[in-house]
Amino acid sequence: MIRHLVPLIESKIQRLQAPLAVQLPAGPLIGSPGAPVKMSFLHWSSLTRLRAGQIGALAEEFVEGKLHLEGRMRDVMAVAAGLLPATPVHSDAGWWGGLQRQMRA
């Protein structure tokens, strides 16, 4: 089990602008009990994706039934935006962005 993640995730939740509750696989709830968004994890390994702010991987966990979400979609998206390590608007597109810039020149 990856219980050492719990304090790191608690810290991440406290820094979010949007309130979030996280149900751990072992049962305890961390975060605000009355939060408009609740994430329930079935596997400890899924928590590593939350800790890293890997929104795409969390979406995959949701589709595969490893993560349950409760809350209005607007609130869920506010939490998702807060979990991102950086703003996606200004992120580096890597090789694809460089290729596009060269093609335009």
Image (spheres, rainbow, N blue to C red):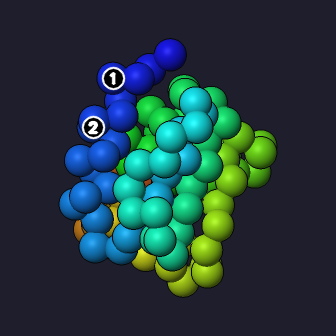
Q: Locate residue 41: give its quadrant.
A: top right
Between 58 and 56, the one nearer to me in the picture: 58
- The residue positioned 28% from the left and 73% from the top of the image is 17
The amino acid type of the residue labelled 2 equals Leu
Between 66 and 7, the one nearer to me in the picture: 7
Residue 104: mark in rendering: none
Q: Is residue 47 visible?
A: yes
Tally of numbered discs? 2
Between 19 and 33, the one nearer to me in the picture: 33
What separation in Å lies between label 1 and label 2 (alpha carbons)? 8 Å
Which residue, as the protein is rendered here, is positioned at the far right? Answer: 64
Percent from the top left, x then y, of residue 20?
A: 43, 64
Mark 2 lies on residue: 8
| Left-right relation of 24 to 11 | right
Helix, strand or loop for disc 2: helix
Q: Is residue 56 visible?
A: no
Residue 4: mark in rendering: 1
Q: Quadrant of the C terminus?
A: bottom left
Percent from the top left, x then y, of residue 63?
A: 75, 51
- The residue positioned 68% from the left and 53% from the top of the image is 68
Task: Please tell me whether residue 1 is drawn above or below residue 28 in the rendered image.
Answer: above
Marks 1 and 2: CB-CB under 8 Å? Answer: yes
Percent from the top left, x then y, of residue 26?
A: 58, 30
| Left-right relation of 88 to 44 | left
The amino acid type of the residue labelled 1 equals His
- The residue positioned 41% from the left and 23% from the top of the image is 3
Q: Residues within 10 Å of mark 1 (few under 14, many from 20)?
A: few
Q: Residues within 10 Å of mark 2 (few under 14, many from 20)?
A: few
Helix, strand or loop for disc 1: loop
Percent from the top left, x then y, of residue 78?
A: 43, 76
Between 75 and 99, the one nearer to me in the picture: 75
